[in-house]
Amino acid sequence: MKRIKAIYPGSFDPPTNGHLDLIERGSKIFDELIVAILRNPEKDPLFSVADRRKMLEAMTAGFDNVLVDTFEGLTVDYALRVEAQAILRGIRAISDYEYELQMALMNRKIQPGLETVFMMPAEKYSYVSSRLVREVAQLGGSIDCLVPELVAQKLREKMDVAHKFENGEQLAGKTHSEGKSKSRKKKL
Ligand code: PNS
């Protein structure tokens, strides 16, 4: 019997409940699903690839047929390397469609044998994106229902570190400007 392996590529910075919902749906229709985190040297992510991998591994520990991996370069090349037949992507709203269609058609142009399969996460996650989760967390809003608890915890830790750093910087800034005003005084 033919076994279908799919990859679910993405940035997952951070992984959300929407991602988890899609992983669960994908795990039901594919024999094997690899959640593939893109290692993108051009992006400045909030979480390191290692952190994202750990979070996704913990989130997917309950699924027997789901693996987490990382990749660099073209998604289609990675899919071929791991002998996957399909790429899974989520579409939350019509606004996702244009970009996703463009990407799917480009991937098909480069690698015609590979199919992109779109799935819709539950409606309650239709507004959840990693970008908005990052923004809400950075501005002190609650992200508790948007991400799994372990991700919320990691986000809180990140924000604490960021606040401490900012406070430290502000103090350093004061010293710096005091220093500046002293040197200005000297010049006068
Ligand atoms: O979670 P994201 O950021 O929407 O995922 C986008 C991702 C990683 C699937 C896409 O950027 C991608 O496939 N990048 C790898 C490079 C590549 O294959 N580019 C051509 C896409 S047509």
Image (tube, rainbow, N blue to C red):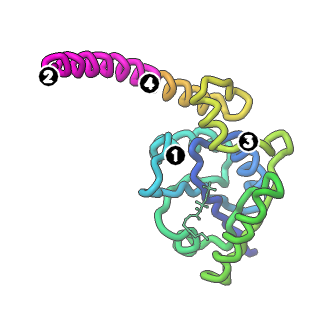
Distance CA(mark 2)–CA(mark 3) = 55 Å
Tag 2 residue: 187
- Mark 1: is the Cβ under 8 angstroms from ligand 1? no
Left or right of residue 43, residue 149 in this image: right
Q: Nearer the viewer, mark 4 or mark 2?
A: 2
Q: Nearer the viewer, mark 4 or mark 1?
A: 4
Residue depicted at x 52% and y 57%: 38
Q: Looking at the image, do the residues carrying marks 3 and 4 touch, with CB atoms under 8 Å apart?
A: no
- Residue 150 location (% of width, % of height): 60, 30
Which is more toward the observer, 2 or 144?
Answer: 144
| Other residues around mark 3 within 10 Å, as few (<14) / some (14–19) / many (≥20) | many
Q: Nearer the viewer, mark 2 or mark 1?
A: 2
Look at the magenta stretch and give its main secondary structure.
helix
Sequence-wise first label, 3 or 4: 3
Q: Does dot 3 land on a helix, a strand or a loop?
A: loop
Left or right of residue 66, residue 117 in this image: right
| Other residues around mark 4 within 10 Å, as few (<14) / some (14–19) / many (≥20) | few
Which is more toward the observer, 47 or 83?
Answer: 47
Q: Looking at the image, do the residues carrying marks 3 and 1 touch, with CB atoms under 8 Å apart?
A: no
Q: Does dot 2 land on a helix, a strand or a loop?
A: helix
Distance CA(mark 4)–CA(mark 1) = 21 Å
The amino acid type found where label 1 is placed reads: Arg
Q: Quadrant of residue 152?
A: top right
* Mark carried by residue 161: 4
The amino acid type found where label 2 is placed reads: Lys
Tag 3 residue: 128
Q: Is residue 100 above or below residue 122?
A: below
